[in-house]
Amino acid sequence: MRKSPAGNACLLALLLLASFSTASAQGPTGRFSRAAVAVGQPLDYELRYEHAPDEEVVFPDSLAHFAPFEYVGRSWQPTRTRNGRSLDRTVYHLRTFSLAPVQALQLPVLVLRRTDTLRLLPPAAQVQLRRTAPALPAGATTPPALRQDLSPLPLEPAVNYPFWLAGLAGVLLLAAGVAALFGQRWRRRYSLYKRRKNHVYFLAQFARHAERFALSRSAPVAERVVVLWKNYLSSLENTNLSSLTTKELVEHFNNDDDVRRALRATDRVVYGNLLSEDAQEVDAAFQRLRNFAERQYESLNA
């Protein structure tokens, strides 16, 4: 028996209605983890969808519209298939700062088809706001409106210890770097300056003692000249020459002719008490000692 075109159209409409009813009955569901929530309190919203295994389903991500709630995070489980049906489940972690007494949320589920995308909405889930502020007693008046005041308040000055400690550490590091780069050069320049200053002081003291000897012809004065000369060479060479005898001094300075002749002449005055020694010979001995000291100073500076 052949069916008429009108009968085929009615049959197709009935099939579409049945499939739509089945899809609606098996659509996504969403619910909150609790019936009441306080302002700022964490709240979970669970979205579930059971579908055919061959359907490609997409759940909302962090860019979805969660108003009046704020998105905090989410957790999901892998798709579980059992008895020919697949189950997708995602829990969204939310919080609200809205003061509405009842707040609702609907998150859509997208079903990807070959030619189009089906957007399925679960029934709206509702949650009540639990107020934590105490209720006003009967007959009490509401507080006046708050007045905005943006004028700055004075603050007591406080020491910024981290800032100063960081600055001190930076200065110390800079000083250490400068010392590593220029420390040796500065020490050498200071050593030359100190040596030059000691040399000038020695020449002045040596000339003063030599002049006193020329006026007094005293053996102790001649001895002080020799002692001053020994002490200066000891500081110049960083050695101890004060305890050496004349022979040891001559050997120490490699039998230098000026040292040998000068010390012999001064020994005759100091130990031989030869005050009648020729003045020109003693003056020449002092000049030899001075010349030798200047040569030692120049050799060290070179």
Image (cartoon, rainbow, N blue to C red):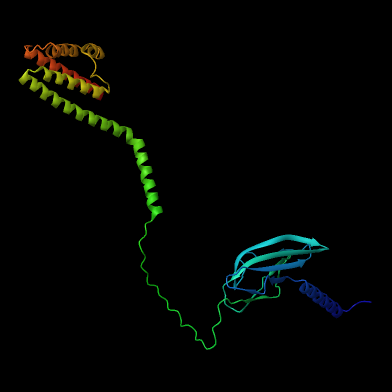
Identify the residue shown where x is 86% and y is 79%: 7
Q: Is residue 192 above or below residue 74?
A: above
The front one of 155 and 58 is 155
Identify the residue shown where x is 82% and y is 75%: 18
Q: Is residue 174 visible?
A: yes
Name the quadrant containing residue 221. Answer: top left
Q: Residue 257: where, in percent of width, then height?
A: 19, 11
The front one of 289 and 121 is 289
Quadrant location of the N terminus in the rendered image? bottom right
Name the quadrant containing residue 219. Answer: top left
The front one of 147 and 137 is 137
Residue 120 located left or right of residue 239:
right
Q: Is residue 302 visible?
A: no
Q: Residue 260: where, in percent of width, then height?
A: 19, 11
Quadrant location of the C terminus in the rendered image? top left
Q: Residue farthest to the bottom?
A: 139
